[in-house]
Image: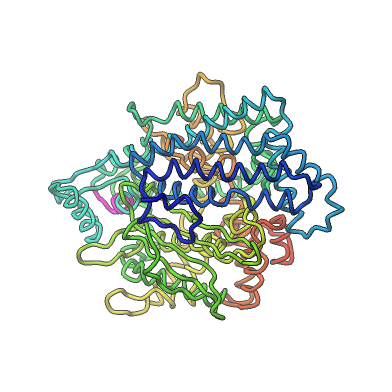
């Protein structure tokens, strides 16, 4: 059978693709892209925006499509063979990327256009694209001497392989652990739905009893409800020890190598640290600004967090005589206290949050805000039978995007939730090519007796990823590298985090929060309790989020010498945010995939940074009405459609009419 990846395709032809197709397809696409670059370099015409910058941005389209298919499969439906191919392909891609940024002829042409940009009468978008490409050369080695260029190639090759290996180790270690329970008494406190799910997991693996894994839909209910403290401890230690044990999946040495490579790469390029290099292209601009921002929030959140922790400790002591609160007590007693204070039980809410209803609710809300219509398409190829595809149109009937959803955990899927793309939006040859967008999550699976019912936290996660998806789907730019979520990293979370706000609003909940059996609307008192409890333990939650951002910054601003303990370095970074006693067997860094596998290195602070933006932006909606078409239209046109065509601070001010402040976030979090 011919290789389906050898020619341009519209929707990804998953059913036709064999693993053996990938490597030759990558090699073929790289050769095609090299020829496209060669045409730019050998052109006898004077370098112009069109024949150099525009041609460069449109080059490598087939390679980009193949990469998106392959690496999305490596995240959502991987296996040993795909992981092996990933390790083989990674250095080829690093080499090709370096071939572009270290190409002296190409850089001279880009620089020539950059130096004479006033003569081309460029639009704002074209100026942004020119600056982006020029910086991609100067920031990635174009000005280095030949010897240093070779060093850079080696750094990039190693980083590509080591970050991949980090993720492979983490997935393997997550899948390796299982807690098998044969005595039903050990499940005391667990809701029937969680027990049924655990029973199904065991049956699927031909085991007796009940099975608990480290996947969130299995792990979190056990930590939240199981009365057996020893088993909670066992599970929590296993969760915190991912890739930290003395086995082949240990990530400690990989962390040291990745951090050292990033530092050496940054220094080679003339920057003090990896954070200095990264933050130059962020809204925050400098590491000092990130620390000032983080420490300011830390100062405001710490008193509330310490008070909340003391109250929780006292509550656990009163209830069960627990004098020292441990990490495996956190979710359990927090849930008990929340039930006491608000008479609100996550399990009582779940029947009102059937996955299908929540998704349709997100669709309806997107329709009200942005004039979108979603319709299931059963003809589009998918990589797994759990994946569903939707055609997205506007209310005028114009095609907007393809939207893929993939909601449940599997052994070949990494943990967490994310949005991704299979095809970018771009305007080419007179056509506005529309994007193919996907969200991937790990929500509670349906059981024999119940559909997939979400916790409220899972509801907000779905809306979060759907917000990212809207950013991708509504993209309306000319050039692919400025389209959709191709924005500064500390701006990309604004469209996702703002969507979470609708989950707390009565008008929105009335759309989708209906009992899965009776169809009854969620009771008004539940809605009020959801709103009341929105700031429950917000101080501790803020401290936790800040701790991750500060750990990330520590790794990338003050990395120690090679002879050090990952665990001790982490403890030092956590010293100002720690509430619970340290657990010797645990290490967060070894499973910190956001920064050691994903793209968040020196950027984890962006969740909090974007929270300031989303709270400020949603306050604008609240002033005018959460479905106000005028505000929604401004958000769509100035934020969602514009991608990276202008500086994000400009885009935000165009939408909001003023600079954001911390006040809306602090007020929403109850920290003022």
Can residue 318 be seen here? The reply is no
The residue drawn where x is 68% and y is 51% is: 55
Q: Is residue 407 magenta?
A: no
| Residue 342 position within the rendered picture, expressed as x and y whole percent measured from the top left | 39, 65
| Residue 556 position within the rendered picture, expressed as x and y whole percent measured from the top left | 59, 33
The residue drawn where x is 20% and y is 55% is: 200
Query: Measured along the vertical axis of the image, is residue 118 above or below residue 259?
Result: below
Position of 299 with respect to 135 (left or right) is left
Position of 486 with respect to 333 (left or right) is right
Q: Is the magenta region chiefly helix, strand or loop?
A: helix
Q: Quadrant of the C terminus?
A: bottom right
Rendered image quadrant of residue 167? top left
Can residue 613 be seen here? The reply is yes
Q: Which sits in the foreground, 59 or 539?
A: 59
Position of 594 with respect to 192 (left or right) is right
| Residue 476 position within the rendered picture, expressed as x and y whole percent measured from the top left | 63, 65
| Residue 618 position within the rendered picture, expressed as x and y whole percent measured from the top left | 60, 67
The magenta span reads 220-227
Q: Which sits in the foreground, 164 or 248?
A: 164
Judging from the image, the colouring scheme is rainbow
Count of labels shown? 0
The residue drawn where x is 47% and y is 72% is: 363
Query: Measured along the vertical axis of the image, is residue 67 above or below residue 558?
Result: below
Query: Measured along the vertical axis of the image, is residue 268 above or below residue 664?
Result: above
Q: Which sits in the foreground, 555 or 309?
A: 555
Position of 87 with respect to 557 (left or right) is left
The residue furthest top is 563
């Amino acid at each position: 059978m011919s290789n389906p990846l050898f020619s341009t395709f519209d929707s990804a032809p998953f059913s036709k693709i064999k693993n053996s197709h990938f490597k030759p397809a990558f090699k073929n696409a790289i050769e095609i892209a090299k020829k496209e670059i060669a045409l730019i370099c050998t052109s006898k015409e004077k370098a112009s925006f069109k024949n150099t910058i525009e041609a460069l941005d449109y080059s490598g389209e087939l390679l980009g499509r193949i990469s998106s298919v392959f690496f999305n499969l490596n995240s959502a439906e991987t296996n040993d063979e795909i992981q092996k191919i990933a390790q083989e392909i990674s250095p080829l891609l690093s080499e090709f990327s370096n071939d572009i940024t270290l190409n002296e002829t190409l850089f001279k042409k880009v620089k020539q256009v950059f130096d004479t940009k006033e003569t081309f009468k460029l639009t704002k978008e074209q100026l942004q694209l020119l600056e982006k490409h020029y910086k991609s050369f100067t920031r990635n080695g174009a000005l280095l001497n030949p010897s240093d260029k070779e060093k850079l190639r080696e750094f990039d090759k190693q980083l590509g392989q080591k970050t991949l290996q980090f993720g492979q180790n983490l997935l393997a270690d997550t899948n390796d652990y299982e807690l098998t329970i044969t005595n039903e008494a050990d499940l005391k406190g667990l809701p029937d739905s969680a027990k049924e799910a655990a029973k199904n997991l065991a049956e699927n693996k031909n085991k007796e009893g009940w099975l608990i894994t480290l996947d969130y839909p299995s792990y979190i209910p056990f930590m939240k409800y199981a009365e057996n403290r020893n088993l909670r401890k066992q599970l929590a230690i296993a969760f915190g020890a991912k890739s930290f044990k003395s086995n082949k999946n240990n990530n400690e040495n990989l962390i040291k190598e990745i951090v050292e490579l990033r530092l050496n790469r940054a220094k080679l390029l003339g920057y003090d640290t990896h954070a200095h290099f990264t933050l130059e292209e962020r809204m925050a601009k400098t590491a000092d600004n990130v620390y000032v921002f983080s420490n300011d929030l830390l100062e405001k959140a710490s008193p509330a967090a310490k008070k909340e922790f003391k109250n929780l400790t006292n509550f656990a002591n009163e209830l069960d005589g627990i004098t020292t609160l441990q990490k495996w007590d956190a979710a359990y007693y927090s849930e008990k206290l929340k039930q006491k204070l608000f008479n609100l039980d996550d399990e009582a809410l779940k029947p009102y949050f059937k996955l299908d209803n929540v998704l349709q609710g997100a669709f309806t809300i997107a329709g009200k805000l942005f004039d979108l219509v979603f319709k299931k398409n059963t003809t589009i190829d998918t990589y797994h039978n759990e994946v569903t595809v939707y055609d997205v149109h506007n209310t005028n009937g114009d095609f907007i995007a393809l939207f893929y959803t993939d909601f449940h955990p599997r052994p070949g899927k990494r943990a967490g939730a994310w949005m991704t793309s299979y095809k970018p939006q771009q305007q080419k040859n007179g056509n506005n090519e529309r994007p193919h967008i996907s969200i991937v999550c790990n929500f509670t699976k349906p059981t024999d007796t119940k559909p997939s019912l979400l916790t409220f936290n899972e509801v907000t996660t779905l809306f979060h990823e759907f917000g990212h998806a809207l950013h991708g789907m509504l993209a309306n730019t000319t050039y692919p590298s400025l389209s959709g979520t191709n924005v500064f990293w500390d701006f990309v979370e604004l469209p996702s985090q703002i969507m979470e706000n609708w989950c707390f609003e009565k008008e929105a909940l009335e759309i989708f929060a209906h009992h899965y059996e009776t169809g009854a609307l969620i009771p008004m008192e539940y809605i009020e309790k959801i709103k009341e409890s929105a700031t429950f333990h917000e101080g501790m939650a803020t401290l936790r989020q800040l701790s991750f951002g500060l750990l990330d910054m520590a790794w990338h601003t003050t990395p120690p010498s090679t002879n050090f303990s990952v665990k001790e370095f982490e403890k030092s970074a956590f010293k100002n945010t720690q509430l619970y006693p340290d657990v010797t067997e645990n290490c967060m860094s070894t499973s910190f995939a956001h920064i050691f596998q994903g793209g968040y290195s020196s950027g984890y602070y962006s969740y909090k940074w974007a929270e300031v933006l989303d709270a400020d932006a949603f306050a604008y909606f609240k002033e005018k009405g959460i479905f106000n078409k005028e505000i929604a239209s401004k958000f769509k046109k100035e934020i969602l459609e514009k991608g990276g065509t202008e500086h994000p601070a400009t885009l935000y001010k165009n939408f909001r009419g003023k600079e954001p402040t911390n006040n809306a976030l602090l007020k929403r979090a109850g920290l003022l």
